[in-house]
Amino acid sequence: MEVETPLLAPTVSTDPQLDFFAVPDAGRPRYLQTSPELLMKRLLAAGTGPIYQICKAFRRGEAGRWHNPEFTLLEWYRPGFELTDLMDEVADLLRTLLPALQDSCRLSYTEVFERWVGVSWQAPLPELAECARRLGLPEAAALCGEDRSLWLDLLFSHRVQPNLPRRRPVFVCDYPAPLAALARLNEDGRTARRFEVFCDGVELGNGYDELTDPEEQRRRLEADRNARRWQGLPVPPEDEAFVAALRAGLPRCSGVAVGLDRLLMLQLQRSDIDTVVSFSWQRLH
């Protein structure tokens, strides 16, 4: 079923990797949504069954060849779906829209990190810092501090992502627990049931076997808020309605968000998002 959720809401994602636009409203801010995820999960908890939407999302400070602060997402959720089934569905979508690509492949985060960074993602932070220094990133220590998730994202984006196989969708699976975000953990407790899909080094989508435990979710949201405080980022209010929806019963489900602007860039073989968005950030200034 197609759904539509608000673009402007009283809460927003706490993800420390994302900045958001706050809109003043009679003394209390509202927020342009960085993703419809939390609102769609409230619908799932209300019993909608499988849902999808194509909508705008907004992320402050993201402007460049592959980023526009306002962009288009395709996001969908399937109750009862295993994550492997969802990856198959995403692969089918990409095969349909990008028929020139080779068949997709699946690699574990642990495998690709060790192959191209040269150490385990579980290595002590000084070892990760040394890897960053060798990559010519002397400012990394000030940016990442003691936050393993920041070190992993930095090294993955600079070393792993550019080296992933080309001309085919690559699903990187079983992300480290510090990068679980809103995904449930695997039984080992060290990795999460999360994947990202890349093509030619570009991230196209991000999928989870969705976390349904409300107390674990609350702990993660608070950890995100603390991480934002440490980084000097604005901290959004607690999303009590989202946690209440999980308490009411979010069904076991898998979900994914796919960036349609980037998908169109690959389909048309364009190298700048400005060429596929009529009113990009560049054109508006």
Image (cartoon, grey):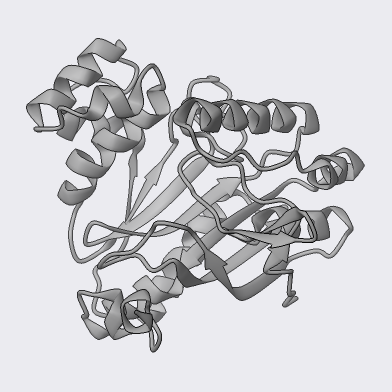
Quadrant hosting residue 35? bottom right
Quadrant hosting residue 46? bottom right
Looking at the image, is 113 positioned above or below residue 146? below
x%, y% of residue 169? 31, 61
Q: Which residue lies furthest to the front in this view?
A: 27
Location of the N terminus (image quadrant): bottom right
Looking at the image, is 284 positioned above or below residue 71? below
Looking at the image, is 143 positioned above or below residue 71? above
Is 126 positioned to the left or the right of 181 in the image? left
Residue in view at x 73 percent, y 69 percent: 6
x%, y% of residue 107? 32, 43
x%, y% of residue 105? 31, 54
Residue in view at x 30 percent, y 10 percent: 124
Q: Which of 169 and 213 is in front in this view?
A: 213
Looking at the image, is 134 positioned above or below residue 89? above
Residue in view at x 48 percent, y 57 percent: 87
Quadrant hosting residue 220? top right
Is 41 positioned to the left or the right of 241 in the image? left
Q: Which of 194 and 9 is in front in this view?
A: 9
Q: Which of 83 and 134 is in front in this view?
A: 134
x%, y% of residue 93? 45, 73
Is 24 positioned to the left or the right of 135 in the image? right
The number of numbered discs placed on residues in the rendered structure image is 0
Residue in view at x 48 percent, y 71 percent: 70
Location of the C terminus (image quadrant): bottom left
